[in-house]
């Protein structure tokens, strides 16, 4: 069965510092991979997705993620964090682009000035 | 781009009553839609798969008689929480795949509070 793990429940970074959020997945084939962000009381916003091709994916708001098949990882990065990036981040996986989405437990990001 | 809407965005009801939540795909047809539930400070958990013209498929542990799903058209799925109790208070989110576009869209969510 597909599963997603996000080892870090909560991360705190200083504004302007770099960020990396970890994500590992368990799936037999290469799945469709996503990163979503959710602000308190809000819905999901898609940051980026990977289906195939270039393993370094660029997303919105200056985020990028790198797919590493050998490590079954899809880590999210941002070179310089802004205070508005404080939110909950979910890594997610599905078998195809129109299949049910399996979400990781989420990582809560706090940004200190 | 394609959008998925949900109505209502929030609802407060008394314990024992039923609440209906709508999920609509705008500008595209969705033969399948998914319903998720998110409790406070938790992740999204799939509740059921809604199939147009046929019965919904429920995930293990989700009571099908309590969470009634109807996918009456290619653009509308409804989730009815019957005899709601405070423990049903949650954030309910639907999603709809746009198969030709090869992507999936999430609704903005419905916050249900049961008093």
Image (cartoon, rainbow, N blue to C red):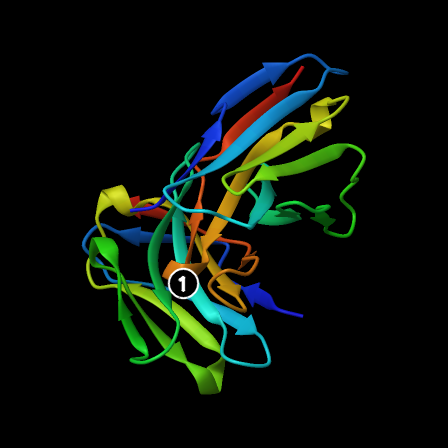
Residue A113 image-quadrant placement? top left
Q: Is residue B33 above or below residue B7?
A: below
Q: Residue at x 47, y 83 (%)?
A: A71
Viewer-proximal residue among A113 and B110: B110
x then y, percent, for residue A78: 25, 62
> Looking at the image, which residue sits at the far bottom?
A70
User: Which of the 4 image quadrants contains residue B64?
Assistant: top right
- Image label count: 1
Q: Position of residue B93 (x, y in %)?
A: 53, 39
The 10 Å Cα crowd at callout 1, few under 14, some 14 to 19, many 20 or more, is few
> Where residue B86 appears, x then y in whole percent?
71, 23
Residue A77, visible in the rendered structure = yes
Left or right: residue A62 versus residue A99 is left
Relative to A23, is B72 above or below? Answer: above
Q: Position of residue A88 (x, y in %)?
A: 42, 47
Residue carrying label 1? B102
x 73%, y 22%: residue: B84
Q: Is residue B33 left or right of residue A36?
A: right
Name the secondary structure under disc 1. Answer: loop
Q: Residue at x 39, y 72 (%)?
A: A51
Quadrant including the C terminus of chain B: top right
Toward the top, the furthest residue is B14
Chain of the residue where label 1 is placed in the rendered structure: B
In the displayed structure, would residue A78 be above or below residue B7? below
């Amino acid at each position: 069965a597909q599963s997603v793990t996000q080892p870090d429940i909560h991360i705190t970074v200083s504004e302007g510092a770099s960020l990396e959020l970890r994500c590992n997945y368990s799936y037999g084939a290469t799945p469709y991979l996503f990163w979503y962000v959710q602000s308190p009381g809000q819905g999901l916003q898609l940051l980026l997705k990977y289906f195939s091709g270039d393993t370094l994916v660029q997303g919105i708001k200056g985020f990028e993620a790198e797919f590493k098949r050998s490590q079954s990882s899809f880590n999210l990065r941002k070179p310089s964090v802004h205070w508005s990036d404080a939110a909950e981040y979910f890594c997610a996986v599905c078998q195809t682009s129109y299949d049910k989405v399996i979400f990781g437990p989420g990582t809560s990001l706090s940004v200190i000035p | 781009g394609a959008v998925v809407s949900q109505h209502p965005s929030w609802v407060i009801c008394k314990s024992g009553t039923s609440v209906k939540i709508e999920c609509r795909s705008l500008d595209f047809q969705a033969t399948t839609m998914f319903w998720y539930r998110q409790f406070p400070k938790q992740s999204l958990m799939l509740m059921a798969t809604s199939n147009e013209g046929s019965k919904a498929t429920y995930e293990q542990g989700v009571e099908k008689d309590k969470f009634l799903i109807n996918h009456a058209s290619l653009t509308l799925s409804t989730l009815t929480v019957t005899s709601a109790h405070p423990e049903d208070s949650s954030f309910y989110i639907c999603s709809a795949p746009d198969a030709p576009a090869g992507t999936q869209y999430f609704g903005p969510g419905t916050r249900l509070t049961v008093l």
